[in-house]
Amino acid sequence: MTQHSLVRFFAPNQGECVGVQIGATVHDVTDTVGSVGAWLRASAGRVDAAIADLAAAVKRSRQAHHTDAFDHAPAPDRLHWLPPVDVQDVWAAGVTYERSRAARQEEARDGGDVYARVYTAERPELFFKARGPWVVGPLDMVGIRRDASWNVPEPELALVINPALEIVGVTIGNDMSSRDIEGENPLYLPQAKMYTRSCALGPAIALGRLDSVWPETRITLQIARAGGGVFSGETHTGNIRRRPDELVAYLGRALSFPDGAVLLTGAGIVPPDTFTLAAGDEVSITIDAVGTLRNVVTVV
């Protein structure tokens, strides 16, 4: 079966566009689909049919681009990637990996008992991360806080959800975090997690219905500085303690998402305590099932 991925991109003289990526070709389906939000709304209760609709839209597309045309920083006079969301809220699940539990306890000034308890609790930790317009896309800048001294990326598999709380696909997420702020007091979590350019998504939404079983895929992180590697790590979706449908069900217990949503599923790669990001670092997150999300770090 041909893998279809949903993307957003900017085209000069057109503005924001929606595309379907098949292999190295992006087919412009803006005229048919309209927006990611419109497609997510149309997919409610009919995920497989909505994906088939995209395949039909590809056949009607009159314009296509090779992915190489997008591989540069955003510029108003050139084709470039946009994050694969428009108005969707981004939420996040915390402490879903054993490695994350251990890291949270190590950074906490009070010993981190709260993180040990949430790791084994029935109810998962869920928190708001970003509004859709706040999200940055591939090759754009991600931020580190100027009032923090210990900043890291958190590479995560992201679930894309329609208004019916159905998982329609996955993308790559970078949940930028200030570990010193979070470690000082658990109540500072919003300041450690939610700030300008703290959330990156992309490059595409790999489409396919997902329920109780995670896609079997590696997640890798590479950080480069001045042209040389300064950190690399790897984990696997098999290490996530919670099920995808479990996380989504808790998210939707008392919330509705009329335009869909994105849920980050936790980080299983944590750089050593001696490491912190610096301006100019390049962060690359690869998930075999999706692709690679690259961003450069700036101070905000």
Image (cartoon, helix red, strand yellow):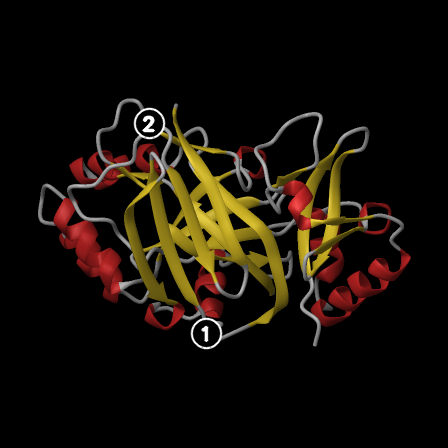
From what the image shows, is residue 138 above or below residue 300? below
Q: Residue at x 30, y 31 (%)?
A: 278
Q: Amino acid at mark 1?
A: Glu
- Residue 125 or residue 38, whichever sits in front: 38
Find residue 268 and report its image quarter.
bottom left
Q: Residue at x 65, y 46 (%)?
A: 68
Disc number at residue 216?
1
Q: How far is mark 1 from mark 2, CA to CA? A: 34 Å
Q: Residue 249 location in percent, x, y? A: 49, 64
Q: Residue 126 location in percent, x, y? A: 39, 52
From what the image shows, is residue 85 above or below residue 78? below
- Residue 189 or residue 295, whichever sits in front: 295
Number of labels in the image equals 2
- Label 1 packing within 10 angstroms: few (<14), some (14-19), many (20+): few
- Label 2 packing within 10 angstroms: few (<14), some (14-19), many (20+): many
Relative side of 27 to 267, left or right: right
Is residue 273 at least partly visible in the picture? yes
Badge 1 marks a residue whose secondary structure is loop
Q: Residue tagged by mark 2?
A: 145
Badge 2 marks a residue whose secondary structure is loop
Quadrant housing the C terminus: top left
- Residue 207 or residue 44, whichever sits in front: 207
Q: Residue 105 location in percent, x, y? A: 15, 52
